[in-house]
Image: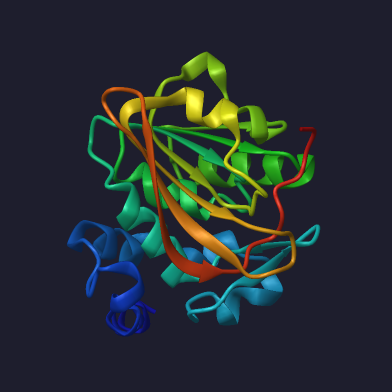
């Protein structure tokens, strides 16, 4: 899996500007047991470089995409992370190795409860899971150094921008549901202004909930 990610990073250099991902990110991807985050009937495919179904119409992202989003986030050991779209908990587990604390929100109740139990069993004590609508973020713990959105939004949600710390980074797929979207890097400058950059065409399940 790691070799596949490394090869694809080289192939997508023109789009991402990165021919290789941070060594810390790659080390974590080699350590996190992805087979623990997929349904039993998908375990044989757990380390293939492709998305896999996890039930309720949702997927666990392709490992390359997890690596890309994590690399773009530039997590540091003292960082506070918000993830919107827990899914099986895999991306949260990856970030938990790189940041101080991860707050993650899942709108589909059974998936949220399953992820919370899975992360607890695997001893990810610095991850907190909440079941709810992630569009409005998790204001209680804001501001965040990093926000990762693992579902496609039609626009960058204003509540998430407000909860992003000055100097912080958000990685989010933006575009129409069930179409090709653009992975976006959103940076909040120290003066509060926002800069955005398109990274790569992607396809994610849609971000759901009230607007």
Instruction: Answer with the quarter of the image where residue 104 lies.
Output: top right
The one nearer the camera, 52 or 114, is 52
Vertical position of residue 142 compared to residue 184: above or below: above
Rendering colour mode: rainbow
State the quadrant of the N terminus.
bottom left
Seen in the image, is 44 located left or right of residue 4? right
As drawn, 11 above or below 66? below
Check the picture and name the quadrant holding the C terminus. top right
Q: Residue 142: image x %, image y %?
A: 46, 19
Q: Position of residue 52 (x, y in %)?
A: 63, 72
Residue 73 picture location, percent across and down: 34, 48
Q: Where residue 136 sits: x, y (%)?
A: 64, 27
- Identified at 55% across, 69% down, the residue is 202
At a point 61% along the width and 65% down the height, the residue shown is: 38
Count of number-bearing discs: 0
Name the residue rendered at 73%, 39% in the picture.
Answer: 107
Foreground residue among 105 and 195: 195
Residue at the location (33% across, 54% down)? 72
Q: Classify residue 1 as left or right of residue 120.
A: left
Q: Is residue 93 above or below residue 100?
A: below
Would you identify the image quadrant in which residue 77 lies? top left
Residue 15 found in image quarter: bottom left
Q: Residue furthest left?
A: 23
**Vertical relation: 186 (above or below) 206:** above
């Amino acid at each position: 899996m790691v070799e596949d990610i490394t090869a694809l990073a080289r192939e997508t250099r023109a789009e991402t500007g990165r021919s290789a991902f941070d060594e810390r990110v790659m080390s974590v991807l080699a350590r996190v047991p992805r087979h623990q985050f997929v349904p039993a009937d998908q375990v044989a495919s757990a380390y293939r470089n492709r998305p896999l179904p996890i039930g309720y119409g949702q997927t666990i992202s392709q490992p390359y995409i997890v690596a890309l989003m994590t690399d773009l986030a530039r997590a540091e050991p003292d960082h506070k992370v918000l993830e919107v779209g827990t899914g099986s908990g895999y991306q949260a587990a990856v970030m938990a190795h790189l940041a101080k604390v991860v707050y993650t929100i899942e709108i589909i109740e059974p998936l949220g409860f399953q992820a919370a139990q899975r992360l607890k069993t695997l001893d990810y004590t610095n991850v907190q899971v909440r079941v709810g609508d992630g569009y409005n973020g998790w204001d209680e713990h804001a501001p965040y150094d990093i926000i990762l959105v693992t579902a496609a939004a039609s626009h960058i949600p204003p509540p998430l921008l407000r909860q992003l710390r000055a100097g912080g980074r958000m990685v989010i797929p933006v575009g129409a549901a069930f179409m090709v979207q653009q992975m976006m890097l959103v940076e909040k400058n120290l003066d509060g202004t926002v800069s955005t950059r398109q990274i790569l065409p992607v396809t994610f399940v849609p971000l759901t909930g009230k607007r």
